[in-house]
Image (tube, rainbow, N blue to C red):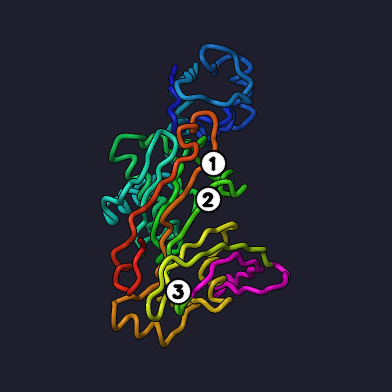
Amino acid sequence: MRQIEITSGQSGQRLDKFLRKYMKEAPGSFVYKMLRKKNITLNDKKADGSEKLQTGDILRLFLAEDTLAGFGAGGGSDKDKELLDKSWAAYHRFGKLQVLYEDSHVLLLNKPAGILSQKASPHDLSLNEWLIGYLLARKKMTEESLVTFHPSVCNRLDRNTSGIVICGKSLYGSQQMTRMLKDRTLHKYYLLYVEGRMDEGGTVRGYLYKDTASNTVSVSRTPLPGSAEIVTAYRPLAAGREETLVEAELITGKTHQIRAHLASVGFPLTGDQKYGDAAKNRRRKEQYGISHQLLHAYRIVFPQMEGELSVLSGMEIKAPVPKLFSRLGCRLQ
């Protein structure tokens, strides 16, 4: 007999899906048969597989160890082992990143510019791998638990955009954060520098089309085939001689949205190599060492929430502004 106690990271999954991951070589028919015959029980009761697992639930598998071993029970696949190796590598490469908030379900960290949120190619290391390495190093998850759940980031920032990244430590946390990002109830604010003087704020709408081959986007005022509607709100905070410090809120969240959207209305981001002013970017690099867009996801505000994440209701979390932002003339008051 093998006993499994469900951790917070594993909670929220359907029992049958959990068992299929745990015994990855077992046919689905075998899993359901064992449930019907009470050879697999949930909290010492018969289960049909549709139950949602909760932290502290006890699964008992009244199966021979040879049978469990034959189905690969609890053992990681080659893909799991590769993820484990990369997670430790990412954790040691990126080092101690600033954690802004953490509970049993979610973790918010301050991403430095230059780190990928998610892998762009199979050999990359990203925050996804760092997160697993971090949780393993602090004994907040085990290597075995990777078989049934992979913690991951919920929102992506461009490699050279810094600031708040939301991570799901549990399936429940991942689902709730993803839902809020999708229904736009989680408010996300960015600090950025634009070229030129911006005297008034506003809200701009448009349609964004992504060219996957070049990893660039274009913005139009009318919809195009394959385009998505975007909405960006912005307001100037302080003006320098040649640039303006701006706060932008993503009403929608699409690839390169702020960068392309503001460039399309005459305010390219300072240092932006894809959508900015090439001549000014060269000068900024020579004068101030700025080699990428000055864009920082600095503040989020949570909506009213219920259940296990109710502690986040109305909470505002900020990420410290990078020192690079202080090299230009205007300052955040």
What is the secondary structure assignment of the residue under circle 2? strand
Disc 3 target residue: 194
Residue at image coords 39%, 50%: 318
Q: Is residue 86 left or right of residue 122?
A: left
Residue 93, picture quadrant: bottom left
Q: CA distance from mark 3 to mark 1?
A: 29 Å
Q: Of label 2 and label 1, which has the lower sequence position? A: 2
* Sooner in the amino-acid sequence: mark 3 or mark 1: 3
Q: Amino acid at mark 1?
A: Pro
Q: Position of residue 280 (x, y in %)?
A: 40, 84
Marker disc for residue 187: 2
Q: Look at the image and give the residue range highlighted in magenta.
A: 198-226
Q: Is residue 304 magenta?
A: no
Which kind of residue does numbered mark 2 sit on? His
Q: What residue sits 29% from the left and 72% below the top? A: 327
Q: Local crowd at mark 2 within 10 Å, few (<14), some, or many (≥20)? A: some
Relative horizontal placement of residue 264, taking residue 193 as reference (left or right)? right
Label at residue 303: 1
* Residue 175 at x, y percent in the picture: 55, 40
Q: Is residue 307 above or below residue 221?
A: above
For disc 3, the neighbor class at 10 Å (few under 14, some 14 to 19, many from 20) is: many
Query: Please, is residue 127 above or below residue 231 in the view?
Result: above
Where in the figure is residue 104, as x and y percent of width and height?
41, 33
- What's the distance in space between the residues labelled 2 and 3, CA to CA? 22 Å
Q: Mark 2 or mark 3: name the one nearer the start of the chain.
A: 2
The residue closer to the viewer here, 245 or 147, is 245
* 207 and 249: which is toward the camera: 249
